[in-house]
Image (spheres, helix red, strand yellow):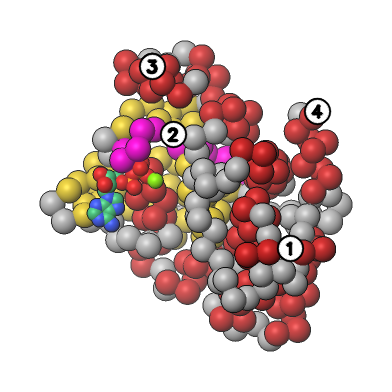
């Protein structure tokens, strides 16, 4: 707490923040291939309601593919994924998009729309919400990520950190049960990283269920309830941050940590 709490408190005051409902995710024997290339090889993972799971591992180990399976940007070859006991593989895509939000490395905002419109669009298009109501929710969500004063700017008029916070506000506007973050600070200038990480830490404290692929080991250590180390399509080790960072068991994780820390 302390510094982190104070810094993020300034951006997302607790009294105006939503109390997230957070869902639980259960993954069993999940496998996924691109053609002949098997990139997930029997993943078993539980993400408890309202907890933060950080996924770490070398490039190409399958981290992004794992997140993509969770909101079915790709279809797994085998295995089961449940959200609060309900199979996501049999959910309607629109229902899944509402319940599982995703934030990407490159923001994926619409360049010709303002911050406010970017957040409103998913509400009007996916939820079919009337414009006035969508506007009210979008304004609230943008204020919560510290961007009330920038809502009428287009992405090009915002810093990378601000664009990423718009993308997070857009994901939150859907009132999701889980939010997936795929290396969301990797494209940011170093001085903009902290604001985004602080916002994510704050969401975690407010009970959002989050799966976070990240190279930010400091964030994983501070914020994660569970850290998952992947290599070559498998979970090699998983556990609380102290265990993963201070007492790694496998040679592969020891080698990885020696390279990144
Ligand atoms: P990570 O996010 O850990 O870097 P990815 O999940 O992106 O790993 O990729 C895992 C493996 O799948 C890599 O070998 C990558 O080259 C391959 N891969 C990823 N996306 C595709 C795709 N759309 N088509 C074919 N191969 C892919
Ligand atoms: Mg990736």
Q: Where is residue 114 in the image (x, y as percent from the top left)?
A: 67, 73
Q: Does 148 sit above or below residue 47?
A: below
Tag 1–tag 4 contact (CB < 8 Å): no
Instruction: Give the numbered dot on residue 50.
Output: none
| Camera-side residue of 106 and 65 | 106
Residue at the image position 16 percent from the left and 56 percent from the top? 35
Q: Do the residues labelled 1 and 2 touch (CB within 8 Å)?
A: no
Image coords of residue 227 (percent x, y): 49, 31
Q: Are marks 2 and 4 in contact (CB under 8 Å)?
A: no
Q: Earlier in the sequence, mark 1 or mark 3?
A: 1
Residue holding disc 1 = 141
Give the distance between the C-alpha atoms of the residues marked 3 and 4, in whole angstroms.
Answer: 30 Å
Tell me which residue sits at (43%, 29%) in the image. Answer: 238
Q: Magenta region's main secondary structure?
A: loop
Label 2 or label 4, whichever comes before in sequence order: 4
Q: In this view, does 185 lie above or below 160?
A: above
The CA span between labels 1 and 4 is: 25 Å
Q: What stretch is highlighted in magenta?
A: 48-61
* Sooner in the amino-acid sequence: mark 1 or mark 4: 4
N-terminal-most mark, 3 or 2: 2
Badge 3 marks a residue whose secondary structure is helix
Residue ID at (38%, 23%): 256
Badge 3 is on which residue? 254
Q: In this orientation, does residue 24 appear?
A: no
The answer to whether mark 1 and mark 3 are in CB contact below 8 A is: no
**Foreground of the two, 86 or 51:** 51
The residue tagged 4 is 2
Could you say whether the residue bearing mark 4 is in a helix, strand or loop? loop
Q: Residue furthest bottom?
A: 130
Check disc 2 and report the residue beneath it. 56
In the picture, the quarter occupied by the N terminus is top right
Toward the viewer: 79 or 116?
116
């Amino acid at each position: 707490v302390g510094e982190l709490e104070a810094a993020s408190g300034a951006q997302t005051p607790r009294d105006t923040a939503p109390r997230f409902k957070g869902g639980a995710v259960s993954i069993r024997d999940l496998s996924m291939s691109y053609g002949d290339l098997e990139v997930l090889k029997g993943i078993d993972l539980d993400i408890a309601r309202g907890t933060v799971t950080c996924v770490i591992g070398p490039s190409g180990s399958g981290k992004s593919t794992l997140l993509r399976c969770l909101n079915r940007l790709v279809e797994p070859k085998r295995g089961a994924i449940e959200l609060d006991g309900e199979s996501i593989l049999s959910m309607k895509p629109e229902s899944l998009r509402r319940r599982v939000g995703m934030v990407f490395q490159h923001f994926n905002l619409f360049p010709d729309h303002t911050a406010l419109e970017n957040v409103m669009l998913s509400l009007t298009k996916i939820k079919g919400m009337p414009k006035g109501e969508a506007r009210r929710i979008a304004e609230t969500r943008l204020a919560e990520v510290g961007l009330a004063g920038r809502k009428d700017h287009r992405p090009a008029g915002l810093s990378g950190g601000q664009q990423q916070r718009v993308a997070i506000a857009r994901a939150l506007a859907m009132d999701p049960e889980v939010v997936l973050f795929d290396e969301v600070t990797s494209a940011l200038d170093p001085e903009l990283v902290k604001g985004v990480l602080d916002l994510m830490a704050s969401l975690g404290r407010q009970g959002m269920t989050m799966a976070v692929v990240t190279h930010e080991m400091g964030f994983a250590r501070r914020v994660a309830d569970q850290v998952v180390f992947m290599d070559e399509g498998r979970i090699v080790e998983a556990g609380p941050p102290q265990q993963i960072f201070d007492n790694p068991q496998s040679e592969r994780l020891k080698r990885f940590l020696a390279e990144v820390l």
